Amino acid sequence: MAGGAEGRAGYRTVLAIPDFRRLTLGLVIDSAGSWAYGVVLLVYVFDRTHSPTWVAVTTVARFLPGLLFSSYAGVVAERYERTAVLIASALGCFLTMTAMAVLVALHGPVALLVALSVLSATIGTPFTPAVGALLPQIVDERNLAAANAVNSTVENVSTILGPGLGGLLLLTGEPSAAFTLNALTFLFSASCLARVRTRSVPTDVTEHGAGPFAQVMVGFRALRQTPAAAAPVAVSVVATFVYGADTVLFVPVSRHLHGGHGGYGYLLTAIAVGGVAAAALVNTLASRFRLSWSIGLGMLAYCLPMALIPMLHAMPGGLAVQVLRGLGTVVVDVLALTALQRAVPNELLSRVLGVFETLVFGACAAGALVVAPLLATLGLRGTLLLFAFAAPAVSLLALPALLAIDRQARHRLEQLEPTIGLLGRLEPFTAATRASLEQLASAAQPLTVTAGQVVIREGSAADAFYVVDDGDLEVVSRGEFGRPRIVAALGPGSYFGEIGLLHGVARTATVRATCDSHLLRIDADDFRQALETGAVNTAMLTTAGLRLSQTHPTLARRTAPDALVVAS
């Protein structure tokens, strides 16, 4: 009971964050519409062509962009501001889906319809890496697993409800209605995303070469050089390989279980139901146990039940097995993503997630391709047993690296906790979320100054915000009065440097240490991001105005508190 309450508290915490709610609402509507559209697209193509080959081509064409372009999509999500990338992606999909609705209404060429579906899928490829990299900026590290679990639940619920919605739309006899509905979901998603205040700082992606290949390789290098990141990716890739095999194995499994024509769909739906059920468990596992052991248990729950299928001869038992397996795969996917988000620096996360998406698509295709020769060689029983035991065994190789991620995450939070506490007590950050404080604490650089040392000098460019951790400093300014005078004394828990950043002007005073002191330095870009995301309390604007009036009363009168700007 305590574990369940702890898990529910994590979900309440993340859903109380306005930006997370906006992001999730957009994903819910968009995901359901996309699943409905997918069903209608395949049925429409078959009705127009009466060709299974065309259906297969359409299916492959829709997923091919994910395999080919996901890595570069991660680069796009680093090179440009992530929230803007999400909005642009949603609007681009809205336009292409609208064009598809018009084409269907006019009974246009099927080949053009498939081409537009490929274009829409390509435009949508930056969405997943951008969302994955944006979440750690919105949600604090302790509740990151809960946020990922909510998104996973959205996907699984959409898997269950979306095809049903598509079936209902087909009953209307107007297939263009499904395309129109999906276009509107993208528009709704864009409107939700436009209200997200969290912003990322674009990263230069040309440091290793300007070409697309060189930029993509940065993500591969980051993954290869970070064993703590490679481990969760490896486990998730193995799980996806098994899922790819499932998409083919469910045909003979359905026959074995006497599932009839609908057996294949029932098995897929049962896995999705297990994924929804996992939402109540995954955050409890993340909060009460190490991610490494939880991921291992999830992998066992996903794979080992496959060994039971040869002993079953009716669909109800097979469905129960798939529900358990669905629970296991969501635990693996959510916690592996959480581990990856913890292990990779935020400025590289989109690129690594893009690479991750490419590997996942490749693993899914490879899993599907190996099933036929395995069935021919080992039969259904032997193939199921091979996947049941070999996949968890391979995943065990990643356990040491996963344990290292747990240790590093704990150590990092322990190191940051004093800084988080100090920042949280300061007037500028009393309204900041835990995630914002973690971001600021990670960005804060310790700085030791000796007695008499100048920290900032009047007239110099404003490039950072400072917090006094220990020691004493004095603030001296000529200002508009022509002669230097001491205007303030700063002790532990004080801050300075905000006036130049807020007003976009040079330093208005000189700050020097009167004894050996310890400071925290937050770079202007990180302070700017905190201001843009609402992490900075507006009360600081009034304080900054009062401070400015002491040295530059004319400038203070010209600049009202609500007209302050962040220095660019």
Image (spheres, rainbow, N blue to C red):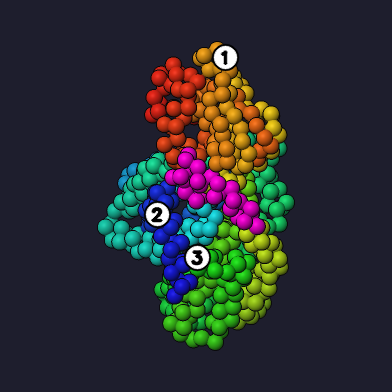
Separation of marks 3 and 1 at Cα, in angstroms: 60 Å
Q: Classify mark 1: helix, strand or loop.
A: loop
Q: Is residue 150 left or right of residue 415?
A: left
**x and y percent of residue 399 in the render?**
68, 67
**x and y percent of residue 164 in the render?**
35, 64
Q: Amino acid at mark 1?
A: Arg
Q: Quadrant of residue 348?
A: top right
Q: Which residues are magenta?
A: 411-436
Q: Amino acid at mark 2?
A: Ala
| Relative to 48, residue 283 above or below | below
To which residue does mark 2 refer? 16
Q: Classify mark 2: helix, strand or loop.
A: loop
Q: Nearer the viewer, residue 300 or 144?
A: 144
For marks 1 and 2, give the one nearer the viewer.
Answer: 1
The mark nearer the N terminus, 1 or 2, is 2
| Residue furthest right in the image | 225
To which residue does mark 3 refer? 283
- Residue 125 seen in the current view: no
Find out whether residue 432 is within the magenta segment: yes
Separation of marks 2 and 3 at Cα, in angstroms: 16 Å
Q: Residue 483's mark?
A: 1
Q: Nearer the viewer, residue 402 or 168?
A: 402
The mark nearer the N terminus, 2 or 3, is 2
